[in-house]
Amino acid sequence: MVIIHEGRCMLAKDQESQANSQMRVLFGKPPLIKGESEEDYWKFWEAFVEDIKPKCWPDWIVANDLAHKYWEQLRLRRYSPALIEGACIEALEVLLRPFLKQAAEAKGASKDKKVASSDNEVSSDIARFYYVGLGGAKQRATLHVAECGITTDQIFALAMQMRGSGLLMLDRMDSNRENACRALRKEIERRSAASENPRDRKPGNENQEPQQ
């Protein structure tokens, strides 16, 4: 009996795998962007299929849509920190300028446009070397930032402010995907509840007493 049971389980898994492969062909290549793994996407997709266990074509569409919406949510949530990190060099450059200006004034430098332009170039170089410099250049930039008392939190906070509109847009897009996922989950629950209710009885026979 154990062998028969294991054989049936293997057969069921083979049938599920075959059904998944057929549906993947029908749905086509997933709409991924550069850097995203198609293999990871289908593993993600199969997890939703395993949980929902679609039995008909509309069920498969809902499962596919739900997997895709959640994948998009994960993508958007990766973009938020990436957007902030992309502005860190610019943010550090802005934070450095007042210190360079004070140092120049302490040395009695004139306040002409050439000096201001030079300060901007220096702050740009320090910020760039701080993040992407090598060897001694990076060490000197790190020491200079530390002497100015500029912290990592300050850099990230200003970077977030600089990219505020972009972060808000990503947040709205994330909320939109969440609302879509919620609607799809409700559709799954509705279809599951409907499938559990017997519909094979004829209308008008609901109140008919069983024969003795």
Image (tube, helix red, strand yellow):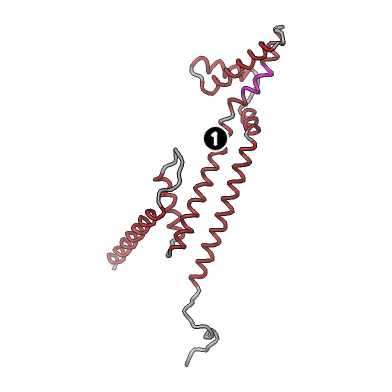
Residue that mark 1 sits on: 82
The answer to which of 5 and 69 lies nearer the viewer is: 69
- Residue placed most toward the observer, 116 or 79: 116
Q: Position of residue 62 (x, y in %)?
A: 49, 59
What residue type is disc 1 on? Ala
Q: Which residues are magenta?
A: 92-99
Where in the figure is residue 154, as x and y percent of width and height? 65, 28
Q: Is residue 178 left or right of residue 48?
A: right
- Residue count near mark 1 (Cα–Cα under 10 Å), binned few <14, some 14–19, many ≥20: few
Left/right placement of residue 122 relative to residue 212 reads right
Residue drawn at point x = 29 percent, y = 63 percent: 7
**Count of numbered marks:** 1
The answer to which quarter of the image holds residue 57 is bottom left
Q: Residue at x 56, y 15 (%)?
A: 140
Above or below — where is 56 with respect to 147? Answer: below
Seen at 69% across and 15% down, the residue is 101
For the N terminus, the quadrant is bottom left
Magenta portion: prevailing SS class: helix
